[in-house]
Every structure is written in structure tokens, then in C-alpha cells.
Image (spheres, rainbow, N blue to C red):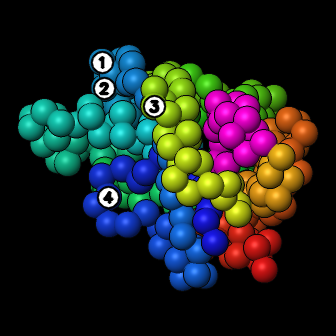
């Protein structure tokens, strides 16, 4: 059966998207349509902060884009040498917190040792940070997107753990989103399942999906990558058929396959 995945392709990865691969192993054909476009901002400030580990108690990355922004700061050869020779070891002496496996893998590519890749959500990560960190540390540095949720900053603030955030990318609707959705429905018809990967995805896609599927909307099994996305879907009045137990390709594919049985 046809599954529509409303997500960005994986960065810098030439192989097939893991979600498409996992769904294929369950006998389903998946199509990926990117929902968001990203623009990097404040990279000079980010670079300054990344090269001053002594001013921070640790790092927090909750999205692959934020790590991508950090990677862009290391593109100049002399910067990369300095990073590899001394800076990354100073960061590795502190805690580098991440949410999820995709972000953890990119953090390892920078030569850093991530903590918390199995946390899966900002809520769970904030609990891990609170267990490990004291209120008298230097501020943790958190490069993030323009539409980050306030869960993690609020939890740390309320418990007196110092935090410094910097917006390093802005999120907007992908310019070809509506066109790509129309083409998909025209060529493939209404999909058996539609998977959302972020509250922004719900915000930007739902109306178009509703319009294009018409009275077949109720036949679609709607899937969520995790609890935050599921909440956004329910808030819009969608009936959520399944949610991944963890935000991985394996878990989501298994949930969708079960819902489509």
C-alpha cells in the first residue's frame, strides 16, 4: 500500500531514506515529500561560541539542523584544524546532550561524544540533564531553530540550571509543498497512510491533504513520529491511527504496518 511521508530527506546521505527502506520491508511503498525549508542565521555568533568552550558548561543539540549549522562553522581549514587539535576535546570534557539517533550520529561526525540519544523527546532529555547537572555550572549552550518548543528551556530554568540559547536556523514552509502534494495525489491517488514528523508539518500540510483527499479522508490511517506531533494532530481534529513508540524508522514502520493490516 501507499504511504506518504511528510518529512525532509536525510542530510548528506546518498542511500535510500531509512523510513522508505523500513516500510518497503513491510511491503509498503513510501513517498517522501519535504515540508520545511531552512535558512541558517547567526553563524558568526555560533562560531564564536563554539570556539569558546571554557565559557559554557556543555552543549545541547535537539535537531540535525542545529548540528549542520555547527558543521558549517568548521568549514574553513584553519578552523577545522583548531577544532580537531584542541577545541573538540575541551567540549568532550563536558556534557554534549542530544535528542534522537539522527542528531547523535551527526554530533559524532563532529568528533563529539553525545549523551541522551535514546531520550527521543525534549521532555525526557531535560530530565536527564537535571539528573546530571548542578545549578552552579556555567550555562549550557543550546543552538536551536526559530520554532523550538519551550519544554527544555522551561524545565531547566524552573530548576535553576543556567542555559544560553541561540537561534541558528529559521524554519518556513517548503516552497514546492503544495505543488508536490497535488502531483502525488494526482499520480498515486489517496494514500493508505500519511505520516507526520513535526507539529510544523501538521500546520503546513493538513489543510492541503484534507482538500486533496476529500471524502476519502476518513479512510487514511494517520501516523505520528512521536507524542508532540500526535498532540498537534489531535488538536486539529485528526484521528491518529498510530504513533511510533520511539522516533526511529523501525518503530514508525512497524506501527504503520500494524495499522494497515
Rounded to the nearest whole Å, what is the CA distance between mark 3 and mark 4? 21 Å
Q: Secondary structure at mark 3?
A: loop
52 lies above or below 5: above
Label 4 CA crowd tier, 10 Å (few <14, some 14–19, many 20+): few
Single out the mark in the foreground, 3 or 4.
Answer: 3
Q: Quadrant of the C terminus?
A: bottom right
Label 3 CA crowd tier, 10 Å (few <14, some 14–19, many 20+): few
CB-based contact (under 8 Å), mark 4 and mark 1 = no
Q: Position of residue 85 (x, y in %)?
A: 17, 47
Rounded to the nearest whole Å, what is the CA distance between mark 3 and mark 1? 30 Å
Residue to which mark 3 is pinned: 176
Q: Is residue 190 magenta?
A: no
Q: Secondary structure at mark 1?
A: helix
Residue to which mark 1 is pinned: 44
The quarter holding residue 70 reads: top left
Q: Secondary structure at mark 4?
A: loop
Q: Main secondary structure of the magenta part?
A: helix
**Seen in the image, is 182 located left or right of residue 49?**
right
Rounded to the nearest whole Å, what is the CA distance between mark 4 and mark 1? 26 Å
Q: Position of residue 144 (x, y in %)?
A: 53, 30
Q: Earlier in the sequence, mark 2 or mark 4?
A: 4
Q: What numbered label is drawn on residue 13?
A: 4
Could one spot residue 55 in this view of the protein? Answer: no
Q: Secondary structure at mark 2?
A: helix
Single out the mark in the foreground, 4 or 1.
Answer: 4
Q: Earlier in the sequence, mark 3 or mark 4?
A: 4
Rounded to the nearest whole Å, what is the CA distance between mark 2 and mark 3? 31 Å
Residue to which mark 2 is pinned: 47
Q: Position of residue 60 (x, y in %)?
A: 53, 41
Rounded to the nearest whole Å, what is the CA distance between mark 2 and mark 1? 5 Å
Amino acid at each position: 500500500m501507499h504511504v506518504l511521508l511528510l518529512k525532509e530527506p536525510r542530510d548528506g546521505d546518498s542511500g535510500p531514506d531509512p523510513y522508505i527502506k523500513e516500510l518497503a520491508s513491510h511491503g509498503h511503498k513510501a513517498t517522501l515529500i519535504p515540508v520545511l525549508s531552512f535558512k541558517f542565521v547567526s553563524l558568526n555568533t555560533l562560531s564564536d561560541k563554539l570556539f569558546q568552550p571554557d565559557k559554557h558548561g556543555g552543549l545541547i543539540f535537539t535537531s540535525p539542523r542545529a548540528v549542520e549549522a555547527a558543521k558549517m562553522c568548521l568549514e574553513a581549514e584553519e578552523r577545522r584544524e583548531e577544532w580537531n587539535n584542541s577545541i573538540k576535546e575541551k567540549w568532550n570534557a563536558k556534557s554534549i546532550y542530544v535528542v534522537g539517533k539522527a542528531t547523535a550520529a551527526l554530533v559524532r561526525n563532529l568528533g563529539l561524544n553525545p549523551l541522551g540519544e535514546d531520550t527521543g523527546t525534549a521532555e525526557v532529555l531535560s530530565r536527564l540533564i537535571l539528573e546530571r547537572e548542578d545549578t552552579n555550572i556555567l550555562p549550557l549552550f543550546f543552538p536551536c531553530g526559530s520554532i523550538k518548543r519551550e519544554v527544555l528551556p522551561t524545565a531547566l530554568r524552573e530548576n535553576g540550571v543556567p542555559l544560553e540559547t541561540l537561534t541558528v536556523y529559521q524554519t518556513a514552509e517548503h516552497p514546492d509543498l503544495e505543488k508536490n502534494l497535488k502531483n502525488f495525489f494526482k499520480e498515486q491517488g489517496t494514500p493508505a497512510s500519511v505520516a507526520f514528523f513535526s507539529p510544523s508539518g501538521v500546520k503546513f500540510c493538513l489543510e492541503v491533504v484534507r482538500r486533496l483527499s476529500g471524502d476519502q479522508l476518513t479512510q487514511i490511517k494517520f501516523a505520528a513520529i512521536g507524542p508532540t506531533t500526535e498532540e498537534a494532530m489531535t488538536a486539529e481534529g485528526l484521528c491518529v491511527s498510530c504513533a511510533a513508540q520511539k522516533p526511529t524508522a523501525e518503530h514508525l514502520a512497524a506501527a504503520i504496518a500494524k495499522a494497515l493490516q
